[in-house]
Amino acid sequence: MALCLKQVFNKDKTFRPRKKFEPGTQRFELHKKAQASLKSGLDLKAVVQLPPGENINDWIAVHLVDFFNRINLIYGTMSEFCTEKSCPIMSGGLKYEYRWQDDYRYKRPTKLSAPQYMCMLMDWIETLINNEDIFPTRIGVPFPKNFQQVCTKILTRLFRVFVHVYIHHFDSIISMGAEAHVNTCYKHFYYFISEFSLVDQRELEPLKEMTERICH
C-alpha cells in the first residue's frame, strides 16, 4: 500500500511541471493557509470557504492552480492505463463524449482520443495560468473582468478528467491503492466549485450518483 501511495505522489509521473507560487506574495500566503487547513483535518466544506477579508479572485486562483497540480498528478499516474487503444474517444461512459476546442489549433469541437484530449487540456491550462494578463502575480495588478469566466471554463474541463478517470479507470485506481486519495481530491474539488457556483450543474451530471454517495 505504501508503495502505491508513493506512486500516486511521484512527481515524475506528472504531465507538466508543478505550478508554484512565489514566496513572499499574497497568493503564496493564501496557498500556505489553504494547505494548512487541509492538513489539519478540517471538514472540507469548511476549508473551501473564503476567509474573512480575503479577495475572492485570489482565493479562486490559488485553488485552481492547486487543483491543476493535483489532477495533473493523478492523471499522470493513470496515463499508462489510458492509451489511444483503450480510450480512442475522450468520454465519460457511453452517454458523454467531450470534444476539444481551443480557438487556435482546433477552432471547432473536435473528436480526440482521451490521451490527446488530456495533453491538449494540460497545455491549454498551463498557458492560461502562466499568462500575467489572466493570472497576474504582481502586487497591485488587478484580475481581468472575465477572470471568473475563464476559471469556470478551466474547472469545467478539469472536472471532465475526474469523469473519465472514475468511469473508465476506477479499477486501476483501486489496484494502486489510490482510491482514498483520489476521492479526497474529488471531494475537495467538488465542494470548492459548489461553494462558488463555478461549474454548471449539467456538467456534473455524469458523476451525480457517486457525488451524492461520497459528498455528504
Image: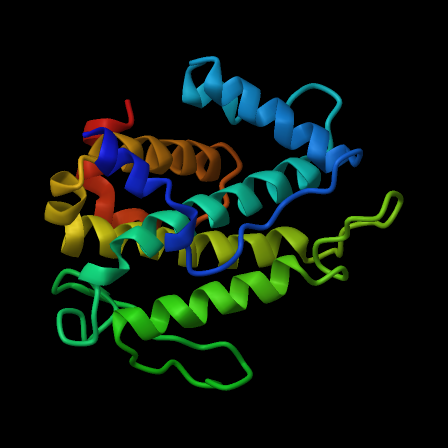
Residue positioned 69% across, 39% down in the render: 58
Q: Is residue 179 left or right of residue 58?
A: left
Question: Would residue 33 be found to the left or right of residue 95 on screen?
Answer: right
What residue is shown at x 82% (from left), y 49% (from top)? 142
Give x and y (percent) for residue 61: 63, 44
Question: Closest to the observer: 201 or 109?
Answer: 109
Which quarter of the rendered picture does the C terminus lie within?
top left
Q: Residue at x 36, y 66 (%)?
A: 118
Q: Quadrant of the N terminus?
A: top left
Question: Where residue 81 sits: x, y (%)?
Answer: 18, 60
In the rendered view, would you say 139 is above or below 188?
below
- Near-viewer residue (5 or 153): 5
| In the rendered image, the vertical position of residue 42 relative to residue 62, given as above or below | above
Q: How is the image coloured?
A: rainbow
Q: Nearer the viewer, residue 38 or 144?
A: 38
Identified at 52% across, 27% down, the residue is: 48
Q: Residue furthest right?
A: 140
Q: Number of marks in the image? A: 0
- Residue 71 point in image, percent of width and height: 40, 48
Q: Tell me if residue 157 comes above or below residue 140 in the rendering.
A: below
Task: List x then y, in percent, for residue 50.
Answer: 62, 26
Residue 200 visible somewhere in the drawing: no
Does residue 199 appear in this view? yes
